[in-house]
Amino acid sequence: MILRPATPADLDAICEIEAHSFPQPWPRATFEAELVRDHARLDVVQRAAHAAVLGFCNYWVVPDPGGPGGEVHILAIASHPDHRRGGLGAALLGRALDAGRAVHAQLATLEVRRGNGPAIALYERFGFATVHVRRGYYQDNGEDALVMTAPLSAPGR
């Protein structure tokens, strides 16, 4: 498994995975902007070098300007439907959390649809817990979002 930063050449694959994974996919321009935003990270996973991109994780590493600390905010994580439940999401999430630890971030945050059981189970395996519910958060169907956080003091998988 190869995990690496995304490049503009990966955007078609990322957009395809996005379209298969979310009811309201983000436009290509969103991912283009993430590639150049200072605090943004967009990583992809492949099974082998020069193989197809099978998943991606878009996250922000936001340092605390006052000193050590900061946070990692997971914006989106998805794998192609033909390659789900094979550890790709876990590998991508682990990489994002490790990136936060590398800069001494103390907390990871994310929002997830209340009905997305597989994603919630993955996040809980990595130490995330629900700290808040945003009622009616998702505009496409009014589904609630669970706000989940995890401490980053020590590696956890």
Image (cartoon, rainbow, N blue to C red):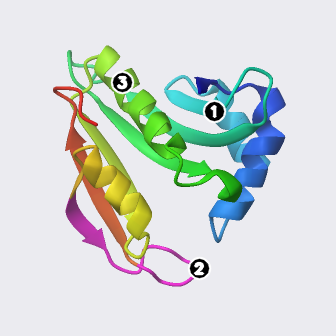
Q: Are marks 1 and 2 in contact (CB under 8 Å)?
A: no
Residue 33 percent location from the top left of the image: 68, 36
* Label 2: few (<14), some (14–19) or many (≥20) C-alpha neighbours in 10 Å: few
Tag 1 residue: 44
Q: Earlier in the sequence, mark 3 or mark 1?
A: 1
Q: Earlier in the sequence, mark 3 or mark 2?
A: 3
Viewer-closest of 118 and 103: 118
Residue 22 percent location from the top left of the image: 62, 65
Please report the bounds of the magenta region as a residue range: 130-143
59 horizontally vs 27: left or right = left
Residue plotted at (30% across, 60% down):
147
Q: Are marks 3 and 1 in contact (CB under 8 Å)?
A: no
Amino acid of disc 1 = Val
Tag 2 residue: 140
Viewer-closest of 13 and 109: 13
Residue 29 percent location from the top left of the image: 76, 44
Type of secondary structure dominating the magenta stretch: loop
Tag 3 residue: 98
Residue plotted at (73% across, 44% down):
14
* Label 1: few (<14), some (14–19) or many (≥20) C-alpha neighbours in 10 Å: many
Q: Which element type, helix, strand or loop, lies under badge 1?
A: strand
Residue plotted at (18% across, 26% down):
154
Amino acid of disc 2 = Asp
Q: Quadrant of residue 63?
A: top left
Amino acid of disc 3 = Asp
Discs 1/2, front = 1
The relative height of residue 74 versus residue 132 in the rendered view (above or below) is above
Q: Are marks 3 and 2 in contact (CB under 8 Å)?
A: no
